[in-house]
Amino acid sequence: MGLLVALDRPGGYEELVGKLCSRVDGFKLGLPLLMARGPGYAGLLRRRCRDALWVADLKLADIGYVMRLTAGLVAEHVDAVIAHGFVGVEGALGELKDYLDSLGKRLVVVASMSHPGAREAYDHALPRILETLERLRPWGVVAPATRPGVVGIVRRRLGPGVAIMSPGVGAQGAEPGSALCAGADYEIVGRAITGSGDPVEAAERIRREQEARLSNCRGTSHGS
Ligand code: O7M
């Protein structure tokens, strides 16, 4: 059971990361924050919480050459980098994965998204993206907590060896634990924690809700 906090809004997060460090599993750094503060800020935050999983959410979608250049700017400061799944393996995700492998870093690929517009194109592409993921075998995959059915499809297709992280819990309406019940390893939560008057209390409450829902669904469906 995992909780990743999305740090998106440009701002200072040193104190928050220190407070949340023992309560969450990792942090996902969004583009607005990385663009405003620069890639080195990821390293500065990381020093506040070394054992957490640190993910740069660049949502890369380009040719391999450019994705490697972009990922290379931040890779030394994080454990994993996120790219879009629709760009394909040859000349794109395959090159990025080889590059990150050579640095000892992990690739996380978006299978589908959490917002309603994902139904317009992304969901139609899911069968093809699953083929890409089967060939590529990235360390992690992003699938939407707002549509746990998609999380289940990804888990069944890729098996237990991939880390699934699911955004959409809280501000976008998904309940804590709903994606975990569908097979995700981590739920990504941004505003419900970072926008709360008491982020520590919010993170602890979400943890409790994840645990409650997970023990409930495991009890009723044996975790399937
Ligand atoms: O909890 P929120 O809604 O404040 O933030 C959600 C975070 O998850 C935010 O950082 C988004 O960029 C991210 N996200 C989505 O909301 N939907 C997606 O489909 C995918 C992501 C994501 O993390 O992609 C890697």
Image: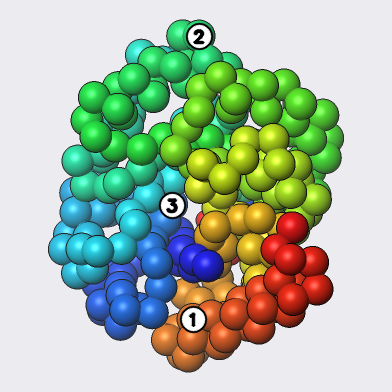
| Residue drawn where x is 24% and y is 64% of the image | 51
Residue type, label 1 = Ala
Point out residue 61 in the picture as x, y percentages from the top left corner.
Answer: 52, 26
Q: Quadrant of ligand 1?
A: bottom right
Q: Is residue 206 above or below residue 5?
A: below
Q: Is residue 15 above or below residue 30?
A: below
The residue beneath circle 3 is: 30
| Residue drawn where x is 74% and y is 58% of the image | 224
Mark 3, Cα crowd under 10 Å, few <14 / some 14-19 / many 20+, is: some
| 16 left or right of 144 in image | left
Mark 2 and mark 3 in contact? Answer it, CB < 8 Å: no
Q: Earlier in the sequence, mark 2 or mark 1?
A: 2
Residue type, label 2 = Glu
Mark pair 2, 3: CA separation: 26 Å
Residue 98: tell me if it is visible.
yes
Q: Is residue 185 above or below residue 86?
A: below
The residue beneath circle 2 is: 90
The residue nearer to you, when weighing 26 against 59, is 26
* Disc number for residue 203: 1
| Residue drawn where x is 61% and y is 40% of the image | 159
Q: Earlier in the sequence, mark 2 or mark 3?
A: 3
Point out residue 149 in the picture as x, y percentages from the top left corner.
Answer: 80, 50
| Residue drawn where x is 67% and y is 78% of the image | 215
Between marks 2 and 3 in the image, the one whose residue lies nearer the viewer: 2
- Secondary structure of residue under mark 3: strand
Q: Is residue 45 above or below residue 139?
A: below
Mark 2 and mark 1 in contact? Answer it, CB < 8 Å: no
Residue type, label 3 = Gly
